Image (spheres, helix red, strand yellow):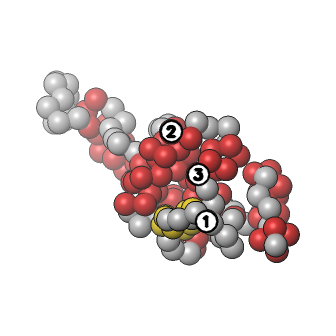
Amino acid sequence: MRLTRQTNYAIRILMYLAVNKDRLSRLGEIAKAYSAPEPFMFKILNPLVSAGLVETVRGRNGGIRLAREATRINLREVVELTEESFQMAECFETGADCPLIFSCELNAALRQALEAFLSTLGRYSLEDLTKNKGYLHRTLGIEKADAAA
């Protein structure tokens, strides 16, 4: 299974916000940190806001931040939100025309593998991904809140 770019960048946005939790972030600075186009990042941000993972603060000094603690956001939730399809093979599709559809165990095996994959992701929180905050601050070019004051 391969995750889409949208899922990859959704996780990156959330990681950035988790590392920069002491202040508001701007989407432009996040896009710059990941060398990604800002309109692409904006498209990814919308479902994160709608799902209540990210909140926006309007105004001159506005920005975005996590809407929940990083420990309360798990990877399965993010992947299920951002992936359009989990159809790993043609037999997952409605109306598949495989002659073996009712006698082949591939479908069951793939469904079990998918559930194992999602279950594993569910055991990891956003906090788990951002434990090395010092390294992430330096790599992403984030100033620590007390250093910015």
Coordinates of residue 63 in the picture (x, y in percent)? 57, 62
Using the rendered view, name the quadrant where residue 99 is placed.
top left
- Describe residue 19's horizontal placement relative to residue 2 as left or right: right
Image mark for residue 143: none
Foreground pick, 113 / 10: 10
Coordinates of residue 73 in the picture (x, y in percent)? 51, 68
Coordinates of residue 42 in the picture (x, y in percent)? 49, 46
Secondary element under disc 3, as helix, strand or loop, is: helix
Q: Type of residue at label 3? A: Leu
Asked if the residues shown at circle 2 and circle 1 are in contact, with their CB atoms under 8 angstroms apart, the answer is no
Tell me which numbered mark, 3 or 2, is placed earlier along the sequence: 3
Tell me which numbered mark, 3 or 1, is placed earlier along the sequence: 3
Image label count = 3
Q: Kindly report the distance in space between the C-alpha atoms of the residues bearing marks 3 and 2.
A: 10 Å
Q: Write the residue at 77% across / 71% down.
A: 145
Image mark for residue 40: 2
